[in-house]
Image: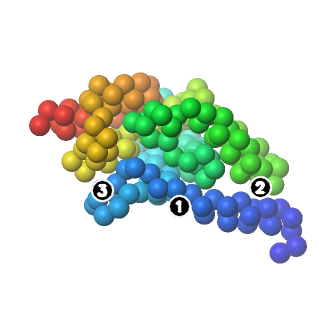
Amino acid sequence: MNSPDLQRQLAFLREIDRLKTVIRKSPLIDQSRRENSAEHSWHLAMYALVLSEHAAAPVDVLRVVKMLLIHDIVEIDAGDVPFHEPSTHAGQAEREQLAAERIFALLPDAQAAELRSLWFEFEAGDSNDARFAKALDRFQPMVHNAATEGGTWVEFEVTEAQVIARGKPPIERGAPTLWEAASELVEGHYRR
């Protein structure tokens, strides 16, 4: 264990264990408790593996999985900010950028640069991979809410128009067929 790179990698891995303590508003589908951000990230990585054929353009699934596994690591410092709590949004982008710089800097320089670059690519949402990753990040909570009789939509009195405004642009841009499925889920909930 004399390798400085290994020491840095282990420090990073110990630090990101804290993502398990960031509790999101979304319940698990069995509604036994709220999910944490690490579970959300893992689940999104599985969504990428299973649903990659629905991407709007060709994607590198491994890059998408990497983006999804790291996209919320910044919540260790910045916290999870639900879209239905706008009072918590001020300064979030700056807090997340500072968190990305701190947390990824724990890694050896080359790995830090790679993960930081992937995180910024996801945030910008300009590549095919990032667009698909962002689509999945919006799609998964919709699936959860529909499966939990409205979940956070009901709990926080989120309107159908708010759900569509939040979900449609990124999902339609990154995975149009998933938007079709999502819109059916939303309509199914709000029309009953």
* Residue, far front: 87
Which label was assigned to residue 21?
Answer: 1
**Three-letter amino acid code at disc 3?**
Ile
| Left or right: residue 57 compared with residue 78 | left
Residue at the spot x=56%, y=32% of the render? 90
Q: In terms of depth relative to the viewer, which is nearer, 156 or 137? A: 156
Type of residue at label 2?
Leu
Residue type, label 1: Thr
Label 1 crowd (10 A; few <14 / some 14-19 / many >=20): some
Quickly name the residue at label 3: 29
Left or right: 48, with 31 as reference point? right
Bin the neighbour count of mark 2 within 10 Å (Cα to Cα): few under 14, some 14-19, many 20 and up: some
Residue 85, labelled with which disc? Answer: none
Secondary structure category for the residue under label 3: loop
Rendering coords of residue 178 (x, y %)? 34, 35
Instruction: Give whichever of discs 3 and 2 has the lower sequence position.
Output: 3
Residue at 41% from the left image edge and 24% from the top image edge = 169
Residue 65 at what x, y percent from top left? Answer: 54, 48
Give the Cα separation between the discs numbered 3 and 2: 34 Å
Q: Quadrant of the N terminus?
A: bottom right
SS label for mark 1: helix
Kindly report the distance in space between the C-alpha atoms of the residues bearing marks 1 and 3.
Answer: 19 Å
Residue ID for mark 2: 106
User: Which of the colour schemes (rainbow, by chain, secondary structure, one colour) is used?
Assistant: rainbow
**Pointers 2 and 1 in contact (C-beta within 8 Å):** no
Q: Position of residue 115 (x, y in %)?
A: 69, 46
